[in-house]
Amino acid sequence: MPNPFENAIRNLVQANRYANVPSGIFEKIKKPEQVHKFTIRTSARSYEGYRVQFNSARGPYKGGIRYHPQVDINEVKALALWMALKCAVVDIPYGGGKGGVACDPKQMPAKEKEAVSRGWAKAMAPHIGAWKDIPAPDVNTDSQTMAWILDEYEKITGRHEPAAITGKPVELGGSLGRDKATAQGGYFILRDALKANKLKSRTVAVQGVGNVGGWLAEILHDKGFKVVAISDSRGAIHNPKGIDVHGALAHKQKKGMLKGFPGAHEITNEQLLALPVDILAPAALENVITRENAGKIKAKIVLEMANGPTTPEADAILNKKGIIVIPDILANAGGVTVSYFEWAQNLTGYSWDLVEVDRRLERQMSRAFKAVHETSKKHKIPYRTAANVSALGRIATAMQLRGW
Ligand code: NAD
């Protein structure tokens, strides 16, 4: 299994050929500021917990918490670095953070998940806060998880501080539109990318219909795209005439899986990646597009909704084939952008309606796309390198201004 942190650093080194950040500063950007590794004990058992905090020059650390059996320090470090870059690409005032717990939430009753979440908050309470580090949901964590973490954190600090956590339930200060924000942002980026590249692409395959991929498939379907394949961890379904996405997701809700949905036939996740579609959106986990399968990809655009779905070797193959790869730190930045809106609303004690949230999200994403597109054209480099160039420049400027 490729080491995602090493992959992230390789991409950064490549981008710095164009960003030209002085080596002293570049070396500092590559290293986390703090790495927290701790044990969470519940009445049932112990778990390894993590939080990695990357580059606070532009603001407090920001990023999600993942519950998954494969969570380890290299994965959390990569995800934290990507958060620092992502926040800089969309120009929101944060550094990067990511947390995780190595556990299998599918095997855990809600009580155990609550105990783990409270344990994570207890361990991290001295190191998080509205102006220090602001956690949010990621794979297998949701608004309920954030509610438990906020509650435990506020019990420890003895005061309300809703801006310390984002992705909360709306009733506890969450923002309208946060649930669909990552997908909505991905849609805005895809729309702008199609226009900028004069493409009329319409057929789509989405790998992983969790929070991000499920919303993306629904939004694209409702916008008139033809979603021909979707998948979850149990397998994929395909219908070249287009899938009734709402029906398929309702089926998954009821049965726990997409398999068995009557409006499509079953294929594997590997087959989904190789379908003759215009747009392929990996929205599950990292390292799914690899040296082994990149040559088989037929899409014109790969919209990276997951973090780190493409290995550097695969990326080189896709670039050579002329496939446009819209990198994770741009494509999926809508989630953290609406998290930023949630934080801003909490700090002012005033909430915005959904129209306001979407309007601001569209503006932020379109601005980011324009900057990355222009950098890409200027240097004749792929969007991934251009996004890293844009992020490195902004982070380095903040560090230089602080005298780091
Ligand atoms: P999730 O847990 O809600 O969904 C993940 C989905 O992927 C599930 O449907 C699962 O069945 C499926 N899956 C797992 N392994 C798979 C496999 N091998 N093949 C196909 N499908 C598989 O998680 P999420 O919040 O939707 O996050 C998905 C990705 O998006 C992650 O990389 C995450 O870091 C990234 N991301 C999430 C957010 C957010 O706001 N939630 C924001 C930015 C990036």
Image (spheres, rainbow, N blue to C red):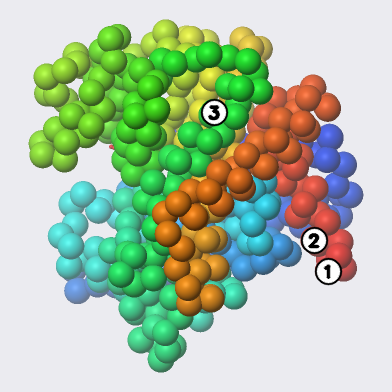
What SS does tag 2 mark? helix
Task: Report whether residue 224 is seen.
Answer: yes
Quadrant of the rendered image containing residue 255: top left
Residue at 68% x, 52% y: name it.
91
Task: Report whether residue 45 is seen.
Answer: no
Residue 387 located left or right of residue 158: right
Instruction: Using the numbered discs, state the Cα–Cα distance from disc 1 to disc 3 in whole angstroms.
Output: 37 Å
Residue at 39% x, 58% y: name it.
176
* Labelled pair 1, 2 in contact (Cβ < 8 Å): yes
Q: Whole-percent x and y of residue 61? A: 59, 64
Of marks 3 and 2, the one in the foreground: 3
Q: Nearer the viewer, residue 273 or 78?
A: 273
Q: Which residue is mark 1?
A: 402
* Labelled pair 1, 3 in contact (Cβ < 8 Å): no
Quadrant of the rendered image containing residue 42: bottom left
Q: Nearer the viewer, residue 131 or 366?
A: 366
Q: Residues within 10 Å of mark 1 (few under 14, many from 20)?
A: few
Residue at 48% x, 24% y: name it.
289
The kind of residue on which mark 3 rests is Arg
Which circle's residue, 3 or 2, is located before the other in the chain?
A: 3
What SS does tag 1 mark? helix
Q: Residues within 10 Å of mark 2 (few under 14, many from 20)?
A: some
Quadrant of the frame with the C terminus: bottom right
Q: Which residue is mark 3?
A: 191
In this view, 400 is above or below 376: below
